[in-house]
Image: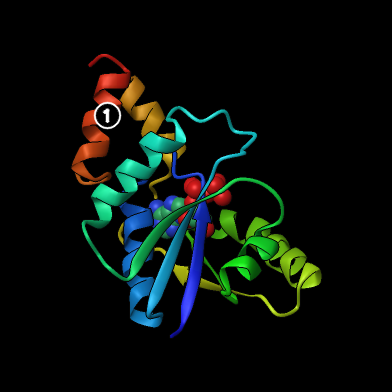
C-alpha cells in the first residue's frame, strides 16, 4: 500500500488543503494528515478544533488518517509511521523557493524520504492566513472553506 504524509498547521483547513488531499488519494492508497501542534505560528484554533474540522471536511474517507505531529523532525515522524513520502501543495511561485529548501533539507536529513508536490488548481489563492483575515473583517468565505470551518470562523470572530 502506498502512503503519503500531508503535514501542516491547518489553522484552519481550507478547500485548498482538501483538494490536495483528494488529489493525493488519486496517487496514493492512504494519506496521513498530520496536524502540527508545536508551531511558532500561535494558531487561532486548538489542535482538537483543527482535527475536528479536518475530520468533518474529509467526511469518513477511510483512506485518510488524521494524526497529530507534536515535535521533532518531519522525516523522523514519517519514519515512525512507516511512510516514505511527504506530500506538499504548490500554490504560486512564492511557495516554490521555500518548498525547494524544505524538500532538500528533508532529503539531506533522510535520503529515504521523498517529497511529492501537487499543483494547486481552483484554490491557488486560498491560504489559512488570508481566510482568517477575511473572516475577521466579515468577508464572505463562500466556496473557500468547508462549511464547518466557515461556521467556526464566524463564531470566533463574533459574526
Ligand atoms: P504551513 O503549515 O506549511 O504553513 P499549511 O498548513 O497552510 O502550511 O499547508 C500545508 C500544505 O498545504 C503546504 O504544502 C501548502 O503549500 C499546502 N497548501 C496550503 N493551501 C493550499 C491551497 N490553497 N492549494 C494547494 N495547496 C495548499
Camera-nearest residue between 30 and 102: 30
Is 20 positioned to the left or the right of 79 in the image? left
Residue sitting at 68 percent across and 67 percent down?
Answer: 103
Residue sitting at 69 percent across and 60 percent down?
Answer: 102
**Residue that badge 1 annotates:** 152
- Looking at the image, how many numbered discs can be counted on the residues? 1
Q: Is residue 5 above or below residue 142?
A: below
* Residue 141 visible here: no
Residue sitting at 24 percent across and 34 percent down?
Answer: 150
Residue furthest bottom as drawn: 1
Mark 1 packing: few (<14 Cα in 10 Å), some, or many (20+)? some
Camera-nearest residue between 48 and 102: 48
Q: Tell me residue 34's x, y (percent).
A: 49, 55
SS of the residue under disc 1: helix
Q: Tell me residue 21's x, y (percent).
A: 36, 64
Which quarter of the rendered picture does the N terminus lie within? bottom left
Residue furthest right as drawn: 108
Q: Is residue 46 above or below residue 106?
A: above
Is 100 positioned to the left or the right of 27 in the image? right
Camera-nearest residue between 97 and 64: 64
Which quarter of the rendered picture does the C terminus lie within? top left
Q: Is residue 49 above or below residue 10?
A: above
Amino acid at each position: 500500500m502506498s502512503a503519503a504524509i500531508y503535514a501542516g498547521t491547518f489553522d484552519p483547513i481550507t478547500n485548498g488543503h482538501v483538494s490536495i488531499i483528494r488529489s493525493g488519494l488519486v496517487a496514493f492508497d492512504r494519506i496521513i494528515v498530520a496536524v502540527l501542534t508545536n508551531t511558532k505560528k500561535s494558531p487561532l484554533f486548538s489542535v482538537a478544533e483543527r482535527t475536528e474540522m479536518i475530520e468533518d471536511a474529509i467526511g469518513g474517507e477511510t483512506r485518510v488518517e488524521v494524526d497529530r505531529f507534536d515535535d521533532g523532525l518531519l522525516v523522523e515522524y514519517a519514519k515512525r509511521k512507516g511512510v516514505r513520502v511527504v506530500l506538499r501543495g504548490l500554490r504560486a511561485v512564492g511557495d516554490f523557493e521555500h518548498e525547494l529548501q524544505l524538500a532538500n533539507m528533508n532529503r539531506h536529513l533522510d535520503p529515504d524520504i521523498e517529497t511529492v508536490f501537487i499543483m494547486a488548481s481552483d484554490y491557488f489563492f486560498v491560504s489559512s492566513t488570508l481566510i482568517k483575515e477575511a473572516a475577521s473583517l466579515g468577508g464572505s468565505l463562500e466556496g473557500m472553506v468547508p462549511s464547518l470551518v466557515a461556521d467556526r470562523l464566524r463564531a470566533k470572530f463574533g459574526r
